[in-house]
Amino acid sequence: MGATIKDIAKLAGVSPGTVSRVLANKTGFFSAQTGEKVRAAAKELGYQKNTAAAELVTRQSNVIAAIVNSTKTNFASPIIEGIQAEAHLHDLNVIIVYAGDDDPEQQRRALTTVIERPVRSILLLSVDLSADNLQLLQSAQIPFCFLSISFDDIQVPYITSDDWQVGYQATQTLLQRGHRSIGLAGVDSDFHTGRQRVSGYRQAMQEAGIRVQPAWVQLGDYSYAAGQQAMQAYGADTALTAVIGASDMAAVGVLNQARSLGLQVPTDLSILAIDGTTICDLVQPALSSISQNFYEMGVAGVRQVSAPDDTSQKITPIKLVERQSIRQLK
Amino acid sequence: MGATIKDIAKLAGVSPGTVSRVLANKTGFFSAQTGEKVRAAAKELGYQKNTAAAELVTRQSNVIAAIVNSTKTNFASPIIEGIQAEAHLHDLNVIIVYAGDDDPEQQRRALTTVIERPVRSILLLSVDLSADNLQLLQSAQIPFCFLSISFDDIQVPYITSDDWQVGYQATQTLLQRGHRSIGLAGVDSDFHTGRQRVSGYRQAMQEAGIRVQPAWVQLGDYSYAAGQQAMQAYGADTALTAVIGASDMAAVGVLNQARSLGLQVPTDLSILAIDGTTICDLVQPALSSISQNFYEMGVAGVRQVSAPDDTSQKITPIKLVERQSIRQLK
DNA sequence: CTGTTAGCGCTTTCAG
DNA sequence: CTGAAAGCGCTAACAG
């Protein structure tokens, strides 16, 4: 255990109160001389402030916690970067805790680690809380905001892309390039986000007068494996000329499986990914994508929890990024 | 601010001490009846323990902090998973804080966030602290351990792969498959890790009686871009038949650049990656790798800080994982 | 088995 | 400008 404020008070020959004041830099409340003395003593003792103790009395903290849903999703990084950048602007620190992979037990653990100590606010990256855990979070009286996830049934603050638009624009993109038989691979319709994407997809198809075959929509969990399975289901002799990967990972799964099946991308099959993380540039051909602005999501998230009453945007923009995985038809 | 132990004491008609005991589950120190009363009251008030306050008095915490070096390196995930798994076994919680990208200022920030509150120990994933910051860390009197990084000049606990062996075995692997002109791409010789890899590489080459051309070793920062640049430097008409990517990302950079140059992998050029993270399986052809056991590093890290005096391994094993990027010559 | 007391390290009135 | 004192929420003796 290191030196305390008392130790340095003794060494400097002043009272603990004074030490507290100079260390907190309450200018005007101590003489230059005392200031020097105290700081010297602090340095000599290698003093490290016990912030927990300070927070106990001031009843407020400057850390914001980000709970992230497993390490599998690769878009957490840009969100976290956004959070950090904005947090540092407000002189806030951020800690991250992993909540496992949709395991309520792990979620609970993550939540309590965070709730049980004075954090200023909580950001949840793509974590879908169980009812119990949501209740726990709400009862904690700490400002929170969900990121990269949306809900239809419950009323909580969240910031994400317009998932309906994601599905709609992805489909539109392919339609505009002459495709009419378009698959959607690896999407999870158990949750709002996925349902919205499917819905946007269907609307675009319908507007184009295309009847969606049941097999065109392959459900999954956005994973690489889900993409592979979807492509496997489509088969080598698929009638599809294009498929939308429900995530970057799913799209890569589709890509690699297509290749295994002997299909050339984009010659035989076009692929459009959803997310637009760095992985799109790593594979060959580079995957065109409907890209989300994850960084901005992080920024908006900390703004939201900092001023919960402000009517900040709940929707971050999306945009098409063309790379090399789409072929213009006709 | 939520209910405190006092509130529930009042509601249950007992003393705060008693409440503390039942909530801490000190069995044998309270009657079943009191237990019930207290728990009921706690639930009714939606009580959330203030762990910071508890830690203040017990002077010990059950959180272990992991400081990670930017989000760029993708091997952080398996290490963190290992840390989590082992930590949970010991009923420890883990928080993560990002230390930016070799920016001393950000490092310092991360360090103080962590030091200023009672964490039980600190794990540093692949972060190379500046002298000042190392001093800060050491003076904090908190057990710590570096992961996935090594040092020659300073004496600190660390756990990593044997980087000399990494370089040596990578080279051996290629040698055994008939290659003699072998490049090493994207390695950073400013630090111990990189120097060791280069040294292992040179030794293996020397043993095989091969004279390493200066241009064969292309320095860099292990990034995708570094891999690209290295391959660009080798050129389309390179005499090399194989190159070792200093990291997975560097290897992918080499791969994609080779393709841009019109080289087929592995027909014209073999590639061996170092690290063996999931990215190796995502690209085509899948990259063979000298794989590190990152998960194990995480596990060993928490063991090390839990029992600093035990003579636990400082070295985690590596192994060759064959995929599709190496061609057997002759 | 339970209440009382002291105090963790810090900040913050309140008097001087 | 500075010291004394109170107290944040909790635990840990110490008596009963």
Image: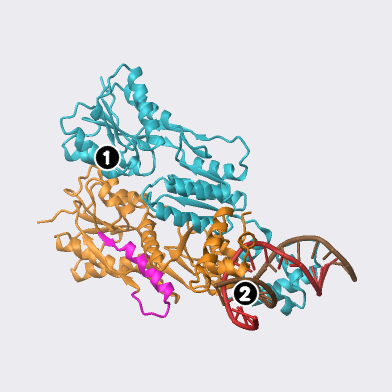
Chain colours: A cyan, B orange, C brown, D red
Q: Quadrant of the N terminus of chain A?
A: bottom right
Q: Is residue B286 left or right of residue B94?
A: left
Disc 2 residue type (three-letter): Gly
Q: Is residue C5 left or right of residue A94?
A: right
Front residue (pair B21, A193):
B21
Q: Chain of mark 2?
A: A
Q: CA distance from mark 1 to mark 2?
A: 55 Å
Q: Are marks 1 and 2 in contact (CB under 8 Å)?
A: no
Tell me the element at label 1.
Answer: helix
Query: Which x, y percent locates residue B126?
Result: 42, 63
Give me the residue at 62% from left, 74% from top: A46
Tell me where residue B198 appears, x and y as whole percent.
Answer: 31, 65
How crowded pointer 1 is (Cα within 10 Å; few <14, some 14-19, many 20+) is rated as: many
Which of the two labelled residues, at mark 1 and mark 2, occupies the earlier sequence position?
A: 2
Q: State the image coordinates of residue B22 (x, y, percent, origin top left).
A: 53, 67
Helix, strand or loop for disc 2: loop
Decide if residue B105 is on the left or right side of residue A7.
left
* Residue at the disc numbered 1: A227
Q: Which residue is mark 2?
A: A46
Q: Which residues are magenta?
A: B290-313
Give me the residue at 40% from left, 55% from top: A105
Kind of residue at badge 1: Gly
